[in-house]
Amino acid sequence: MSTKTRKTCRALLLALSGLMLLGSAAEPAWAGERQDGYNYSAWGKAVPAPAAYEASSLVNGGEAGGAAFKEPSDLQAAQGGKVYVLDSGNNRIVVLDADFKPIRTIEGFEREGQKETFDNPQGFYVSESGEIFVADTGHARVVHLDEDGKLVKIVEKPKSELLAADFAFKPLKVVADRSGRVYVMAEGVFDGFMEFGSDGVFTSFIGANRVEVDPAEYLWKRLATREQRSRMVMFTPTEFTGFDIDGEGFIYAASASRNGQPIKKLNAQGADILRRGGYYRPQGDLLYDNAKGPSRLIDIDVGDSDMYSVLDAKTGRVFTYNGDGYLLYVFGELGNRIGQFDTPIAIERVGDRMLVLDRALGEITVFGETEYGRTLNEATRSYYAGDEERAAELFERTASLNANLDYAYAGIGKALLRQDDYKQSAEYFKRSMDREGYSKAFLLHRKELMREYFSWIMSGLVLAAIAFVVTRAVRRRKGRAVYARIK
């Protein structure tokens, strides 16, 4: 073997060793022994954290006083603490009160005097006024019911030049805004969400994901023959997996995207306006086992004060972020104990409780806030509402409960920044490793010092200038006198 060949082999071995080390580091520090709670530091390391939510009870159809749930696929919260469960296997919607007792069951509706039922519905949405929109997947339609369960309209397969002639309409998820526009996530649609007007007429697609390309696969396609390329899978955008809508009409969407943005916030034009000002982009777990792959976000729920939570189907964890994109807390996992899941499919916030629906077990796990979770949530709400003094106080308390939460110090820094306490703000930003916040606070503090001491500085400069001129004049006069004597 030549010297050149040996060097090449050595370089390849070193590169492979580096990749193996990276792969082994791509797990949290306690990968084999999970803690009850954890978060990620500003450096991207997994650190222990108190539990923000703890499981308090389980709810299934039988325990709620009716028939057991069979492969439920979605749940929604409504006014008065009511909870709607889409019991897909039984083709019905079960309405529960705040104590999870059954109020009524919707198994169908009347259409032109005829009784019709649902067929394997996969998603639904309940508006603020109690109207229900059902993605009736088996019947290839969206059913719009009023708060009493009476039919308002049906959205069926649309006809449009934007759709292929053989397009099969299979709605999976649905939401609606206050003006009556309906947005549908349909199977096999890669152009984004289908938008329908209040009259049920299809108008356009919004929010399409970008095409994700594997560099190695792209290179192979460039080098392959025409016959080989014809057998390859075409590059297509990533499908969305779940979405929700807030009170202002912004759509929060989750997808299984690996290289793009797995979480988006879409405006009316379909542009992504999600803020990603945290230490890292909102994406679920940062560290993971390479054999299992990254988080697969299956559902998203928008809460108050711009907070939102996403559900990871791969690990059973719930990740909650604030409006700036900071990770607040993580809870839940797969398993067979209370607070763990088999096949998590949907998440919903109801007041101060979090609900997670398990499709395989046919049950809802109810989580209640701990002191830590309640304090952090209230701190986030206070900051969002502009109550900086209250926010700083609550973030201080949060930091005392969890010294590993870098965001708490950043929260204190932001609250102090709004109170114009730039010096203290800069110190907290420095502690939280928030470079952008520190730079802003430092510059404002420097300007504040300049304004405070400007008159003294200018007076000093003027006096120094006068002293310089006088000294120079005296020296010149003395020099002339000496010169005159010598002469």
Image: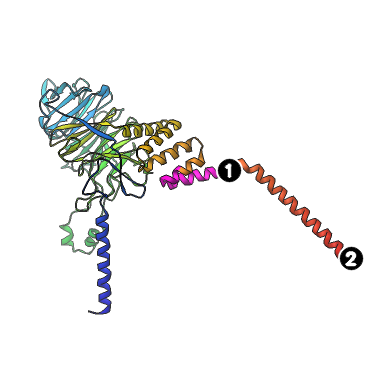
Corner quadrant of residue 316:
top left
Task: Measuring from the top left, give residue 485's x and y in whole percent.
Answer: 89, 65
In-image side of 405 versus 236 (left or right): right
Quadrant assignment for the C terminus: bottom right
Q: Please check the rendered image and state whether residue 437 is part of the magenta-colored stretch, yes or no.
A: yes
Task: Measuring from the top left, give residue 217's x and y in whole percent.
Answer: 22, 59
The residue under the point 22% across, 64% down is: 223
- Distance CA(mark 2)–CA(mark 1): 52 Å
Which element carries disc 1, helix, strand or loop? Answer: helix
Looking at the picture, which amino acid does disc 2 mark?
Arg
Q: Which residue is mark 2?
A: 485
Residue in front for this viewpoint, 149 or 326? 326
Which element carries disc 2, helix, strand or loop? Answer: helix
**From the viewer's perspective, is residue 10 above or below residue 338?**
below
Q: Which residue is mark 1?
A: 449
Marked residue nearer the N-terminal end (2 or 1): 1
Q: State the extent of the magenta-drawn residues as a range.
A: 428-446
Quadrant assignment for the N terminus: bottom left
